[in-house]
């Protein structure tokens, strides 16, 4: 390997590794829409990420019902309901170089391919974040991002929580204090019943959404989604199999490529030095 080329590869790999380290220390930049909105979701005030995280950290699970109600409300208040459509590109949504350089580059490539008619939708440019702090700092998301944020927080708080993928909606199933709950942080609604009971009696869901101030039309529409057909219960990495695979691959690329590249260059330099002695 030529010296100039090997030096270039080493410093590029080092720059990518440094970007990864910076990403551990820097929060995602807040989306512009999350800066503009004051009131949302049935009158909730859109809260800054630092305030939501501080309040979540102060919650205690001694009173399980209050803990889940308050956590759902805080997550709902911290995430404005927005996500770009499959065929729309939003530079403020895609992961940045310091978050994951591999996803950032793939998102940029997708933009070129969609503009050229090769692809008709975005995947990497719309890839969701998994950590509740990162999601809250970005400040936007639809049901899946809100539920990912809530489940991420609850699991770290020691609560048995899983994602529930419904027919067009995502909520969180949690069990605390011997009671089962369904939590909808996108609508700020808590249903004090297990998933099976709501599947068998959609009126439980309708009553919860009506009680939260939503119209009868919205409540009935959402209640139908809780039907038993096609529901999925699992962790953050498995509720959407394709996204789960993508997240595993990009995580490996993020750290593996720069580390392997630097090690190979160092090995080549060492081998060259020994050969010249």
Image (spheres, rainbow, N blue to C red):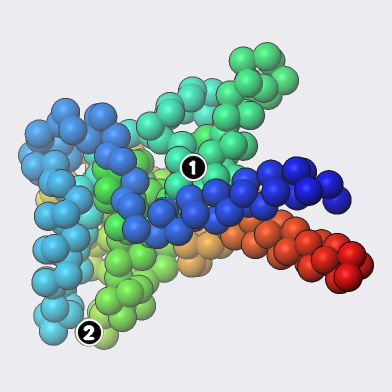
- Tell me the tag on residue 177: 2
Whether residue 213 can be seen here = no
**How many residues crowd around disc 2 within 10 Å: few (fewer than 14), some, or many (20 or more)?**
few
Whether residue 211 can be seen here = yes
Sequence-wise, the earlier of marks 1 and 2 is: 1
**How many residues crowd around disc 1 within 10 Å: few (fewer than 14), some, or many (20 or more)?**
some
SS category of the residue bearing label 1: helix
Q: In which quarter of the image is residue 149?
A: bottom left
Q: In which quarter of the image is residue 35?
A: top left
Q: Mark 1 points at which residue?
A: 97
| Left or right of 257 in this view: 232 | left
Instruction: Residue 88 in the image: state x and y as whole percent.
Output: 49, 23
Instruction: Residue 28 in the image: state x and y as whole percent.
Output: 34, 46
| Left or right of 227 in this view: 10 | right
Instruction: Residue 58 in the image: state x and y as whole percent.
Output: 11, 72
Residue farthest toward the right in the current orientation of the protein? 275
The residue drawn where x is 62% and y is 37% is 106
The residue drawn where x is 25% and y is 30% is 33
Question: Which quadrant does the C terminus fall into?
Answer: bottom right
- Tell me the tag on residue 189: none
Q: In this view, does 208 lie above or below 235?
A: above
Q: Which of 156 and 224 is in front in this view?
A: 156
Residue farthest toward the top in the current orientation of the protein? 116
Q: Which of 5 and 25 is in front in this view?
A: 5
Q: Report how far apart the C-alphas of labels 1 and 2 lie in the structure.
A: 42 Å
Instruction: Residue 240 in the image: state x and y as whole percent.
Output: 56, 53
The residue drawn where x is 36% and y is 78% is 160
């Amino acid at each position: 390997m030529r010296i100039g080329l090997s030096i270039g590869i080493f410093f590029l790999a080092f720059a990518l590794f440094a970007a990864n380290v910076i990403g551990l220390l820097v929060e995602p930049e807040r989306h512009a829409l999350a800066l503009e909105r004051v009131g949302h979701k049935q009158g909730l005030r859109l809260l800054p990420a630092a305030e939501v995280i501080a309040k979540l950290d102060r919650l205690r699970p001694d009173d399980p019902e209050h803990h889940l109600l308050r956590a759902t409300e805080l997550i709902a208040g911290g995430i404005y309901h927005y996500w770009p459509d499959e065929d729309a590109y939003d530079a403020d949504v895609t992961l940045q170089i310091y978050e994951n350089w591999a996803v950032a580059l793939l998102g940029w490539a997708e933009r070129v391919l969609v503009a050229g008619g090769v692809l008709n939708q975005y995947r990497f440019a719309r890839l969701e974040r998994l950590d509740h702090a990162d999601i809250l700092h970005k400040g936007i998301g639809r049901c899946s991002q809100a539920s990912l944020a809530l489940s991420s927080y609850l699991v770290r708080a020691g609560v048995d929580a899983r994602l529930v993928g419904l027919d067009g909606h995502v909520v969180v199933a949690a069990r605390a204090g011997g009671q089962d709950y369904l939590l909808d942080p996108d609508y700020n609604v808590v249903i004090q019943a297990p998933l099976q009971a709501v599947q068998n009696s959609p009126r439980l869901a309708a009553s919860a959404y009506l009680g939260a101030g939503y119209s009868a039309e919205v409540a009935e529409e959402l209640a139908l989604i809780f039907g038993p057909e096609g529901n999925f219960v699992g962790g953050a990495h498995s509720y959407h199999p394709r996204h789960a695979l993508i997240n595993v691959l990009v995580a490996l690329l993020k750290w593996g490529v720069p580390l392997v590249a630097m090690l190979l260059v160092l090995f080549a330099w060492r081998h060259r030095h020994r050969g010249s002695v």
